[in-house]
Image (tube, grey):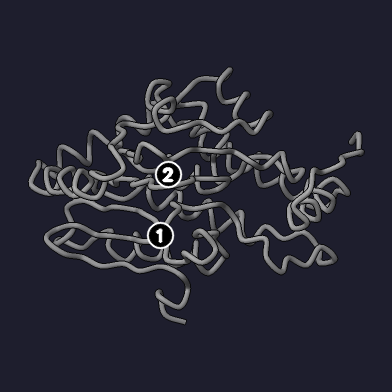
Amino acid sequence: MTTTERGVVSTVENGVLRVTIDRPASLNAVRVETLDAIADAFEDHSVDPDVRVAVLSGAGRAFCTGADLAGLDLSAAPSAETIDAANRVVEKIRGFPRPVIGAVQGPAVGVGVSLALACDLTVASESSYFLLAFTRIGLMPDGGATALVAASVGRARAMTMALLAERLGAVEALREGLIAKVYADNDFDMEVESLARSLAVGPADAFRRTKDAINDATLGQLDSAFARERAGQLALLATPDFAEGVDAFQGKRAARFGSFA
């Protein structure tokens, strides 16, 4: 299966690696093969001397609306396959030796928030928003989100986003420190291009050491978060609340949770 068939397009031009989640019909909801293709793109170009900066984006009207729940078999045994694939993407972005821009246009939901915040400079169009929707289907944040969000906005705001599944608009996300910049919708592509070009001609070694130092200082709990989230999510995937949450989501109705585990 090619990268394109897996729902990702990656190109290198003028020193810029562009990795685009290309499943617009599903608002860029991701499957395991999609996450693998994103991770592969960053891994394959990690030692590419022609790459000076990377941009992660989504095609169409969304950045990424989380894991694809279409056709999910609730009778199957819980699997960590999607969780592990998401964690690998975050690890590859964090370890990428060049600055990575997360270009969020439209919703970033669920693991889409993790992908966006794994990037070094997360920028968004004015109409975009961020939503940790996991509890709406009886799950907990994963993909390192419990560490990535808290490192950006602090414990209280992270709890609000995660427990209450509150949508955070781009302007508020900027004000609270979740993201780096907000651009007007009509200017977004131009502004992202300008930012990428400015980084592409900058001091690559200094950028790498700066990125590594800040990530080490602020994301020291990321690996532990991966482990906690993986264990917790596997337990939650086996609960009646998850089955009810998915059924409600697919039926476009409010979930009626009832377990007290």
Regarding mark 2 in the picture, which secondary structure is present there?
helix
Q: Farthest bottom residue?
A: 1
Residue 184: % across, % down = 28, 38
Q: How many labels does the image show?
A: 2
Cα distance between the residues tagged 2 and 1: 16 Å
Residue that badge 1 annotates: 60
Give me the disc on residue 74: none
Kind of residue at disc 1? Gly
Q: Is residue 47 above or below residue 187?
A: below
Q: Is residue 250 above or below residue 242?
A: below
Q: In this view, does 141 lie above or below 72?
A: above
**At 40% from the left edge and 74% from the top edge, which residue is drawn?**
3
The mark nearer the N terminus, 2 or 1, is 1
**At 58% from the left edge and 56% from the top edge, which residue is drawn?**
84
Q: In which quarter of the image is the C terminus?
A: top right
Mark 1, residues whose alpha carbon is within 10 Å: few (<14), some, or many (≥20)? some
Of 141 and 23, which appears nearest the observer?
A: 23
Residue 183: % across, % down = 28, 37
In the image, 175: left or right of 145?
left
Kind of residue at disc 2? Ala
Residue 248: % across, % down = 79, 51
In the image, 253: left or right of 70?
right
Of 37 and 137, which appears nearest the observer?
A: 137
Looking at the rendered image, the disc whose residue lies closer to the viewer, 2 or 1, is 1
Of 189 and 71, which appears nearest the observer?
A: 189
**At 84% from the left edge and 45% from the top edge, which residue is drawn?**
241
Residue that badge 2 annotates: 116
In the image, 71: left or right of 241?
left
State yes or no: discs 2 and 1 in contact (Cβ < 8 Å). Answer: no
Residue 7: % across, % down = 46, 70
